[in-house]
Image (cartoon, helix red, strand yellow):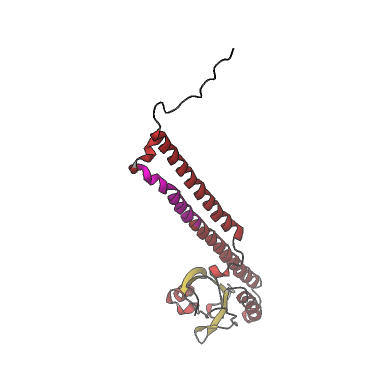
Amino acid sequence: MLNFLNDRRYRFILLLPLAFLILNAVYFRYATVEIQKVLLNEKYIGIENEVDMLAAAVNANPERYWVDHEDNIRDSVEFLDKLHQIYAGLYKFSEGQLTLISERFFETTPIEPLDFIEFRELVSTQEHGKYIVGYTPETQTYRELYLYFRWMPGYSPEHERYLVIAGVSKYSIATNVALWVAAGQWASMAITFVLNVWLVLLITRLGSIYDKRTGEKWRKEPVPDDKY
């Protein structure tokens, strides 16, 4: 049965360990990307919840004059903007146009979300929502910024409300997967590859011996003569 490995038509079996290694590398690559997506989504949900919590606090006191909320909203937005790779901006209407009234603490090339026509149209028609913009900061790599916006206070007329915009990208993720996880993946792949190669070579060698052996292929151990 083992002599089939000596046939040239079946020598491709020697490539199986390499193919297995490539498949494992592709799998671990996609698994890493999926983990990053989950972490980014959690980061976005966190920012969304913080903006919603700020809106809930503002809406909790409808009798308060809308201007009195400005300092609290601005301080909260600027606090968010100071976090690692987080975008946050506060806007209000001035002479019929939305104007940035919060200070920016940007770590990369500053971006203006309202420069994107589709986002501007979305903001003008929705109370809150999500939008993704892609841009490339100076001397850095391309990234997608996941934006969340909300108008507040909800009880005020449009021209008296504030627009809060916050956003995150994959560079906003401060907690990454531990290095030992990736190292363990590659180590297991290397060990599996070596063992597979060794096993294939061993089977091939056994096949060669089997093919060259004459007479009965499987021989029993000789039974020693009875001395008595």
Residue 183, given in percent of the width and then of the height, sits at: 57, 57
Quadrant of the snapshot with the N terminus: top left
Measured along the vertical axis of the image, is residue 177 above or below residue 143?
above
Is 16 inside the magenta-drawn segment? Answer: yes
- From the image, which quarter does the C terminus lie in? top right
User: 151 and 210: which one is in front?
Assistant: 210
Front position in the image: 104 or 57:
104
- Part of the protein shown in magenta: 10-28
Q: Residue furthest bottom?
A: 95
Among the 4 quarters of the image, the one containing residue 60: bottom right
Q: Identify the residue at the far left of this view.
A: 9
Query: How many marks can you see?
Result: 0
Q: Say if 49 sits above or below 100 in the image.
A: above
30 and 153: which one is in front?
30
The answer to whether residue 174 shows anywhere in this view is yes
Q: Residue placed farthest to the front in the image?
A: 227
User: Is 112 placed left or right of 178 in the picture?
Assistant: left
**118 within the magenta span:** no
The structure residue drawn at horizontal position 34% and vertical position 40%, both measured from the top left corner, is 7
Q: Position of residue 70 (x, y in %)?
A: 63, 80
The residue sitting at 45% across, 27% down in the picture is 218
Q: Main secondary structure of the magenta part?
A: helix
59 above or below 219?
below
User: How far from the left and from the top, in percent, is residue 213?
Assistant: 40, 32
Can residue 125 be seen here? The reply is no
On screen, residue 108 above or below 178: below
Q: Nearer the viewer, residue 159 or 82?
A: 82
Q: Horizontal and vertical percent for residue 112?
A: 50, 79
Instruction: Name the quadrant containing residue 13.
Output: top left
